[in-house]
Image (cartoon, coloured by chain):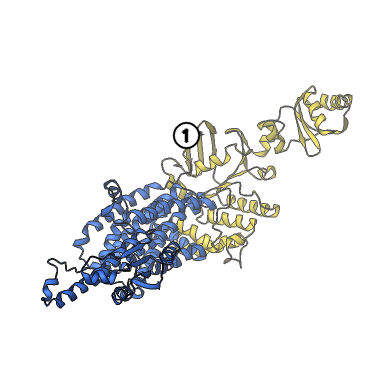
Amino acid sequence: MNAAPAVLVEGLVKRFGTFTAVDDVSFSAQRGEVLGFLGPNGAGKSTIIRILCALLRPTAGRALVAGLDVTREPEAVRAHLGYMSQRFSLYDDLTAVENLRFFGGLYRVPDAVLAERIAWAVEMAGLTGRETELVGTLAGGWKQRLALGCAVLHQPPIVFLDEPTSGVDPVSRRQFWQLIHHMAESGVTVFVSTHYMDEAEYCHRLALMDRGRLVALGTPGELKRGSLRGALLRVECQPLGEALDALGRAPGVLEAAVFGDAFHVTVSAAEPALRDLPRWLTERGLQCGAIAEIPPSLEDVFVARVGGGRA
Amino acid sequence: MNWGRAVAIGRKEVTQIRRDPRSLLIAFLMPVLQMALLGYGARLDAKHLAVYVFDRDGTQDSQALLERFRASEYFELVRAVDDYGALAAAIDAGRCKLGVVVPPDFSRRLRDGDGVTVQALVDATDDNTANLAIGYAQGVVGAYSAAVQLDWIRRQGLPDRVAAPPLSIEARTWYNEDLDSRNFIIPGIVALAMSLVGALLASLTVAREWERGTMEQLVSTPVTAREIMVGKLAPYFAIGLADAALCVGTGVFWFEVPFRGTVDTLVIATALFLVVTLAIAFMISVAIPSQIGASQMAILVTLLPFNMLSGFAFPIDQMPAAIRLITYLVWGRYYLTVLKAVFLKGSGVLAIAEPMLAMVVYAVVVGTLATRAFRKTLK
């Protein structure tokens, strides 16, 4: 039972007309795993999630959720999952409890359990005492947690969260990730798409998406170790525009990108670059400051894998 | 079909309607307003038409004729003028619909047995009223003419029956004995009110989910298309029935329109009509994911054909053959036929079997199409 993957995707393709949103993607996820989808807008993250929720039909390939084929048994698939779409799709003109009761009704949560589950969701969302307020009057963080409550009221084994934390304050985001990890510990498989790099670190495994393709899949540590050819340097240099240009043409430099007020530069080898780069820059009339080798962050991995210059 | 899920959808819809003042107004105030406005305002028969007279004769005879106009409930003698220009000006200004001119030799020619012509100037901008005015005026003048004739015959010492015309018609108006146009209009307003409320409200229901971004969440649950449709339409079905009761009640108890049929016929016909109207509005709502677009389309598809082609405003018998064929598609026409029968005729079920059957067929076809219209996948 444990051996069967919670989600299995093989050769998945989705085309909208001539546009390929998902291009031959394969992966699997285990029970209790938090799998993150990372990628720029339009990379195909939402499309994959929608296919797995049986909201879109794949053009080709196969997708099994809880062992059920999404194209052949869409309703059975839907009963096994919880889905939270990009906008927190709650009914603003209903109260928190009315929203919960509505989704409880749609998922046929038995009456005996429903009251208990609603109480759990209200507490989880931090809405105790505000159960009868209209959802439209709640702030983002509360709405977001309530939306999660609605999506998992029926205790699904697999949960899909499509950019659940966009537009929510940092404290709420951290609370939200705690909830995600609680769920995973109890055996729930959680899919999360995000474009926040710091959130990606919380995932057990990461799927890096770019223009419909799965460009890398692994734990955050694996990705950081395996993604870079050569070494990563942090270089301070002014002015930024001309420095970026010069770094890009410098010998031994594979990739240069602006990070805050400095550069992250990927080089083929650390030693010669640490020695030669300051001189290369100074010769071109640029002011070179501190230069040091640093461990790569996920953002560096992302830049390296998904294409440079897009920091 | 899981009833629990349909009930969940229905309960949610009811809560949303309760919290939305606009929906409540459309659901309950609109039918009442329509009944009041059309019940009082829309009258096809003209009474108390304003009349100006120009009596160029000024004799007892001419005054006797004008007295008959005064006595008629169809006319209201507003004013006597003493020149032609004033009469023309009054018609121009819309102060009167009819101007009656009595010629100067009226009395003399009448006594000599020569023919006399009384001139009637009619404002025919509204042809219906003009036709009625001419008809009523002919009636008044004809009656006076007959009286003069009878008078002459008596003076000649001849028996009265000489004056009796050889042929006459004895008309008995059935179903609407008083020829009150209100009795004819009220059943139409009932249907109109329900088309409006049903189509308008139900057309918003799916579009609203799209517009507010709740649709994606909804279709990600195991709820089926049929459960969504039944759950969403059931509250509007109930509102429609309540509105029908409200309208019929107002018609019968306030406007005193006769109700000669049976309540169950009315309920069955109303239920069928609502099923068709709601199913069509639902399909529109599925097809057009914006509330404004959907409601406009709903009005175009339900209300407009009902007004024009159901026989409510214009008699179907008098339409060109091609248009008459189109009217068979207007489901309001069948409902209107049943309503008129229920209110005015009190016919048994057999007499209205045809329109009832037509509505059953319509409901089955449209209802089936509506359940297939909704797709749970996104585009």
Q: Residue at x 28, y 50 (%)?
A: B324
The answer to whether residue B224 is seen in the rendering is no
Q: Which chain is blue?
A: B
Q: Quadrant of residue B84?
A: bottom left
Q: Nearer the viewer, residue B14 or B332?
A: B332
Q: Nearer the viewer, residue B200 or B286?
A: B200
* Residue that badge 1 annotates: A59
Q: Viewed as shown, does residue B217 lie left or right of A126?
A: left
Check the residue under mark 1 and report the chain it is in.
A
Vertical comparison of A250 with B23: above or below? above
Q: Which chain is yellow?
A: A
Say which amino acid is labelled 1. Answer: Thr
Q: Viewed as shown, does residue B18 lie left or right of B177?
A: right
Vertical comparison of A9 with B74: above or below? above
The answer to whether residue B219 is seen in the rendering is yes
Q: Position of residue B301 (x, y in %)?
A: 39, 51
Quadrant the N terminus of chain B occupies: bottom left
How many marks the image carries: the answer is: 1
